[in-house]
Amino acid sequence: MRGEILVEGQGAKGEALVLTAPISFWGGVNPKTGLIADVRHPQHGVSISGKVLCLPGTIGSSSAAAVLLELVSAGLAPAAIILHEPDAILLLGLVVAQEMGHPTPIALRLDRGEFKKLAGNSLRVSQDGSLLISPAGER
């Protein structure tokens, strides 16, 4: 399986965290902990740090880029980000992080229908956008 590269970044491996609802990074993710902070989100309290974060959608805010930049600079960012649809504001956070010299996660676009195949598995995301799926806990 291969995703369309939206923002180049480091290859990554980690557990797939497939969100079941769209999220706003501004107010929805705590940049100091990497936890989903929105109490109305189905995955409230779950950490996105070090995960391959699969987003079915985002809830816009012009501050989303700043939250993602804070996560990157604090070492709390997802290992990779997979979006159903590109979100230019959110991805700007990765571009700015790169310009500031931070190692950044790769961001890909992948059809939401593929997310079901990723849930509950470990993923290896290559810099060319290819995804290798392994059962959770397998290396």
Image (cartoon, grey):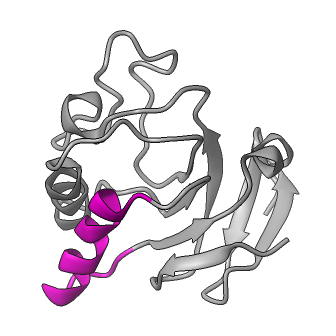
Residue 137 seen: no
Query: Which residue is at the front of the view, 124 or 117?
Result: 117
Q: Position of residue 85 (x, y in %)?
A: 56, 55
Q: Which residue is rendered at x = 43% and y = 17% of the image?
A: 41
Location of the C terminus (image quadrant): bottom right
Residue 129 in sight from this viewpoint: yes
Q: Position of residue 86 (x, y in %)?
A: 49, 61
Magenta stretch encompasses residue 99? yes
State yes or no: residue 29 in magenta. Answer: no
* Residue depicted at 35% across the width and 76% down the height: 104
Residue 108 location (% of width, % of height): 58, 69
Question: Is residue 38 positioned above or below 8 on the image?
Answer: above
Quadrant, the N terminus: bottom right
Q: Quadrant of residue 100?
A: bottom left
Left or right of residue 53: residue 71: left
Please report the residue visible at 36 percent of the width from the left and 36 percent of the height from the top. 59
Left or right relative to 71: residue 10 = right
Which residue sits at x=62%, y=65%?
Answer: 109
Whether residue 130 is situated above or below residue 33 in the rendered picture:
below
Q: Does 87 sit left or right of 61 as displayed?
A: right
The span picked out in magenta is 87-104
Reply above or below: 43 against 53.
above
Q: Is residue 94 left or right of residue 79?
A: left
Residue 9 percent location from the top left of the image: 45, 83
